[in-house]
Image: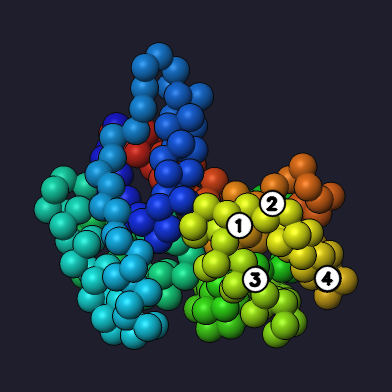
Amino acid sequence: MKTIGIIGGISWESTQHYYEVMNRYVHTKLGGYNSIEALIYSINMERIVALHEDWTLIEKLLIETARKLQAAGAELVILTANTIHKVFPQVERSIHIPMLHIADPTAQAIQSAGLRKVGLLGTKITMEDGFYAHRLQAMHGIETVIPEKEDRELLQRIIFEELVVGKLVDSSKKQMLDMIDQLVKQGAQAVILGCTELSLLVGPKDTKVRLFDTTELHAKAAVDWAISKP
């Protein structure tokens, strides 16, 4: 089994969920006492927030972290947050081991379901910046739609004031389910939970709309890579 390097802490709530998903999945695949071989570098999220979306400095921090994992023996690196994939290409170029982009296993699952147009929920940067939607379109032929501006602002607040600090609020769950319904009205055939905390609040049991949980798909794809390589 290969060693996975995990850049976490953004937030620790989703990082621990990654760890649980990965270990439960590897046990399902291999049985016995199997668990993942992993190195976790948990960044203090306050350091990221303090950079005030200065992506040059965020890129530098992530590159330093990825290189530390590489030096420590990681054979694959994953970023456990959708938003910071904004600088994925730069981080990928800075190391000599592979990285797994969170959008790729998500896109593969969407394609396997025979879908071509999906809603995208996440932070404002993930929804508005274009780096995520562009990868889905350019590399996988998948079109995305996003909520209206007011709902994007609301979702940003839910993520940063509630989910990243472990608060699960019923009214926010209802608001998020309303957003999912609105995306379907815009033509979405399904919805991507494009923030790794969103699945802590809403899951398949809460809606009839097909959801693609980036945390679960990314975590399982990393495990598949680790156990399939000689």
Q: Is residue 126 above or below residue 191?
A: below
Which badge, 2 or 4, is on the more N-terminal residue? 4
Q: Are marks 1 and 2 in contact (CB under 8 Å)?
A: yes
Q: Are marks 1 and 4 in contact (CB under 8 Å)?
A: no
Q: Let me know if residue 208 appears in the view.
A: yes
State the image coordinates of residue 212 (x, y, percent, origin top left). 65, 53
In the rendered structure, find residue 202 and report the number of the disc placed on it: 2
Which badge, 1 or 3, is on the more N-terminal residue? 3
CA distance for labels 1 and 3: 10 Å
Type of amino acid at the residue the image marks with label 4: Gln
Q: Let me know if residue 111 appears in the view.
A: no
Going 54% across and 46% down the picture, which residue do you hit?
A: 216
Q: Secondary structure at mark 2?
A: loop
Read off the residue under disc 1. Answer: 198
Read off the residue under disc 3. Answer: 155
Which badge, 3 or 2, is on the more N-terminal residue? 3
Q: Secondary structure at mark 1?
A: helix
Which badge, 3 or 4, is on the more N-terminal residue? 3
Type of amino acid at the residue the image marks with label 2: Val
Q: Secondary structure at mark 4?
A: helix
Read off the residue under disc 4. Answer: 182
CA distance for labels 3 and 2: 13 Å
Residue 156, located in which quarter of the rendered image? bottom right
Going 84% across and 50% down the picture, which residue do you hit?
A: 208
Residue situated in front as seen by the camera: 23 or 179: 179
Q: Are marks 3 and 2 in contact (CB under 8 Å)?
A: no
Q: Is residue 56 above or below residue 164?
A: below
Type of amino acid at the residue the image marks with label 3: Leu
Eye-nearest disc, 2 or 4: 2
